[in-house]
């Protein structure tokens, strides 16, 4: 059991996927975790899976930290109540938008603004397609970003305790202001979400035979369109001002594109299309690569494998034997047949030798 | 060497990635392939890599098939010239748009419409990020869709020869009308391309620290924004009418979303957002799964692995031992640390047992 920075007890308000996962992660370090959820059944499940214990009858709990793991909509009021109830505790929330909660919280506490010295807004950027305590895992935050959004009022102690929570759960800590955070997630999370949904929405009425030509391009762009509407309604609503600013830019570009495509042979039309594509190239190239490394630091190759158990394992075992580390890997989909294409990214310096070695070993390297 | 349906000789006009790959694939079957490219250097490279031979001095070539592997812009004129020059040959093009080429071709041949009995428009849906003959591979089309777009004039013989080309190269043949094809690719290929570019375009001006929070959602949505502008200008321009229709729908939805986000607390705003997300869910769920199977036929789990050589191989080897086939696989990116999350999809019936077996074997199954 590793030494922890938190000493506990930690009170977790809300025992959904994130709350229960935080409980499991802290329990794995032996920290005393008390769970509370408005839904008795959700709380019971979280307790059953070992995410923490229920509050004892007449127990006078003095938590070191209160983690508000409630839906974005109610986070501010739950935080305010916790700050009132536990006079010595640091209180953090983990909602994925921060400005709206800070504003609502300030309005609730009003004149008692000294309460806010013990509050830090945070955002662990984890979470999976599934929800609820049953999906909880103690490693959910391992190696994932956890953003701390301290306010001017947040005390050093409060920030230190919030920081301890993140690193005790194995997360990578980032420091943003609430405004920086909301602007960043509007761009890297909320924009792709709505655009993916807009693309997927077009597929509702289309004949199935058209979809039979779907490739990885469409699959990649629409993957997150499967996300949960209930949660996203709250996120998009709360971050509307930041997202709107970005969407106005998209709207301008889209209108420009539609105008261009309406007269594709007009002078300058091709230049406009080339410009749109080039701007996409430029923006895409700025996305950091795996482990925050430069986006351009890996090169790709594709290997053909039979789609049966053990084939990909055999390939990767041989690549391991060759001594090359696979930086990223994905399967290429193909309609109608059972052959897989494995796309691998490796350090550019390793690529040529790897292609030769794999070819010598009888693998079909497509690119 | 497998028996082939084509007998040859096959003349390939254009020795870029696709033309050279077609040459390599047919040469692998021992078919006589003659290569011609307006760029002597590109032709020389293609010949050097064994994609075919150059036309002999004073050779009177009578090809069974002429494959026009030229850019979309010039495909129609090259097809027309080939139909005139080789009176007995079937001629196919492989451009990724079909209506514009058919229209332009009909205009060029004019009264000599009997020429068109020997023409079939086709679209092999392969090709990689890299281009040029150096990137060519004989397996490029293996297991990928190859769409045949016969016109009313196309003879049975011409269609049969085009079909032979596709299956000799290991492709999966689809039959569409040119209109069906262009409508389908506008939706499954051209729409995601422009939307991905529009999202990536927003990243040009953003501060780097915001991009440090980029996750798989943004990476997936913007991956194809790295595509080649030169080619896409021709594709988007040629398929403008079909793409426009779809983009008008996107424009309406985007305008609706912007209106809603401009007054996020207005009555009905939340319903509008929920509707947008739900429509995305509905459309995304219609995309066929791997091998054309139903989209819903696999369930996912995520396993934590150390990011060092052999770890993923070890995991997949053990999954093979357990006897479960991995249907799809991808690595989860994480900023700043060297731990990988491997997302696996398997048949739902296998999932529970697999999670238990892997956990017993000491793997950390996150979800």
Image (cartoon, coloured by chain):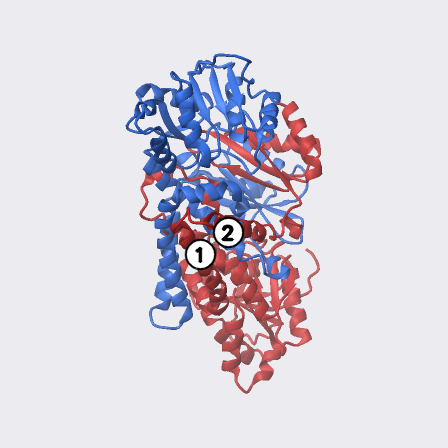
Chain colours: A blue, B red
Q: Residues within 10 Å of mark 1 (few under 14, many from 20)?
A: some
Question: What distance separates the C-alpha of mark 2 from that of mark 1?
Answer: 9 Å
Residue occupying the point 55% across, 14% down: A56
Circles 2 and 1 in contact, beta carbons < 8 Å: yes
Question: What element does badge 2 sit on?
Answer: helix
Which percent across, then down, holds residue A95? 44, 33
Left or right of A328 in this view: B155? right
- Residue A103 seen by the camera: yes
Which percent across, then down, holds residue A312? 61, 39
Q: Residues within 10 Å of mark 2 (few under 14, many from 20)?
A: many
Question: What element does badge 1 sit on?
Answer: helix
Residue named by callout 1: B256
Q: Are marks 2 and 1 on the same chain?
A: yes
Report the front residue among B125 and A355. Answer: B125
Report the front residue among A51 and A276. Answer: A51
B364 vs A252: above or below: above
**Residue, far bottom:** B111
Residue named by callout 2: B276
């Amino acid at each position: 059991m590793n030494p922890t920075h938190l000493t506990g007890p930690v009170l977790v308000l809300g025992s959904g996927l994130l709350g229960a996962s935080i409980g499991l992660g802290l329990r794995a370090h032996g920290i005393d975790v008390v769970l509370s959820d408005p839904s008795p059944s959700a709380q019971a499940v979280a307790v059953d899976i070992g995410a923490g214990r229920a509050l004892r009858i007449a127990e006078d709990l003095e938590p070191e930290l209160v983690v508000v793991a409630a839906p974005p909509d109610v986070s501010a009021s739950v935080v305010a109540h916790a700050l009132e109830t536990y006079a010595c505790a640091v209180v953090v929330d983990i909602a994925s938008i921060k400005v709206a909660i800070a504003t609502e919280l300030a309005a609730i506490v009003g004149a008692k603004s000294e309460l806010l010295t013990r509050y830090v807004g945070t955002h662990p950027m984890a979470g999976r397609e599934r929800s609820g305590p049953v999906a909880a895992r103690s490693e959910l935050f391992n190696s994932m970003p956890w953003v701390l959004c301290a306010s001017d009022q947040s005390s050093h102690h409060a920030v230190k305790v919030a920081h301890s929570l993140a690193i005790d759960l194995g997360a990578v800590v980032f420091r943003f202001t609430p405004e920086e955070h909301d602007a960043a997630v509007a761009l890297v999370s909320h924009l792709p979400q709505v655009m993916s949904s807009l693309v997927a929405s077009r597929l509702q009425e289309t004949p199935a035979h058209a979809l039979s030509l779907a490739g990885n391009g469409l699959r990649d762009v629409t993957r997150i369109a499967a996300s949960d509407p209930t949660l996203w309604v709250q996120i998009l609503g709360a971050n509307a001002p930041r997202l709107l600013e970005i969407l106005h830019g998209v709207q301008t570009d889209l209108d420009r594109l539609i105008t261009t495509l309406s007269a594709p042979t007009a002078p300058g039309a091709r230049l406009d299309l080339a410009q749109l594509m080039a701007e996409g190239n430029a923006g895409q190239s700025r996305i950091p690569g795996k482990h925050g490394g430069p986006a351009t630091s890996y090169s790709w190759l594709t290997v053909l494998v039979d789609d049966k158990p053990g084939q990909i394992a055999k390939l990767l075992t041989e690549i391991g034997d060759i001594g090359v580390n696979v930086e990223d890997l994905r399967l290429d989909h193909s309609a109608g047949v059972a052959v897989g294409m494995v796309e691998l990214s490796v350090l550019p310096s390793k690529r040529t030798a790897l292609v030769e070695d794999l070819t010598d070993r009888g693998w079909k390297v497509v690119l």
